[in-house]
Image (cartoon, grey):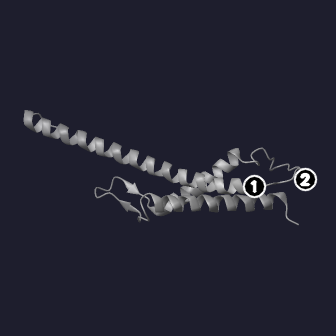
Amino acid sequence: MKTSTDIIWAIAILVGLFGAVGGLVKCFLADGFKKPSTDPDGTVWRPGWYAHIIVGSVAALVTWGLYGPLASYDILNPDPTRPLSFKLGELVGAITVGLAGGQILASIAEKNADKITRDNLIKTIKAITDNQTGEPHE
């Protein structure tokens, strides 16, 4: 006979797998299956397609753990009279969260790349300005 803990772990694995599917779909829809890479100047690391899958899986698990039907389940002192349930809508919701998790990852990477680009542009403009005025640049 399976224990409540066994069932919860099985559900968590399913949620994580379906979140990973959402991350996989995100790769297909967005930027394809790009390999991990670093920008030519080495300042920005782009984790590639597998990061979407990992983030999708983790995002689905976190969302399910916080807002799913078992969020208030006491795992240290389970109530054997309380039935565990897991509905199809929760599993399919994991795919949606996986899609969104991949978008969050892309947004963070773009924000970091934009900041580095802005900082490099400011340095270049300062160097050009200092060279034109004859002042030494820092």
Q: Is residue 35 above or below residue 39?
A: below
Question: Farthest residue toward the right?
Answer: 81
Q: Position of residue 11 (x, y in %)?
A: 73, 59
Q: Nearer the viewer, residue 99 or 105?
A: 99
Q: Quadrant of residue 20?
A: bottom right
Q: Is residue 53 left or right of residue 79?
A: left
Tag 1, which secondary structure? loop
Q: Earlier in the sequence, mark 1 or mark 2?
A: 2
Q: Position of residue 36 (x, y in %)?
A: 41, 63
Q: Nearer the viewer, residue 99 or 132?
A: 99
As measured in the structure, the alpha-carbon distance from the residue carrying label 1 to the one carrying label 2 is: 20 Å
| Front position among marks 1 and 2 | 1
Q: How many marks overall? A: 2
Q: Position of residue 112 (x, y in %)?
A: 39, 46
Whether residue 134 is visible, yes or no, is: no
Q: Position of residue 70 (x, y in %)?
A: 77, 49
Say the numbered circle drawn on residue 80: 2
Say the numbered circle drawn on residue 87: 1
Q: Nearer the viewer, residue 18 or 133?
A: 18
- Mark 1 burial class by Cα count in 10 Å: few <14, some 14-19, many 20+: few
The three-letter code of the residue at mark 1 reads: Lys
Q: Quadrant of residue 23?
A: bottom right
Q: Quadrant of residue 19?
A: bottom right
Tag 2, which secondary structure? loop
- Look at the numbered discs 1 and 2 and tell me whether their residues touch, using CB distance below 8 Å: no
Quadrant position of the N terminus in the picture: bottom right
Residue at 44% from the left image edge and 59% from the top image edge: 47
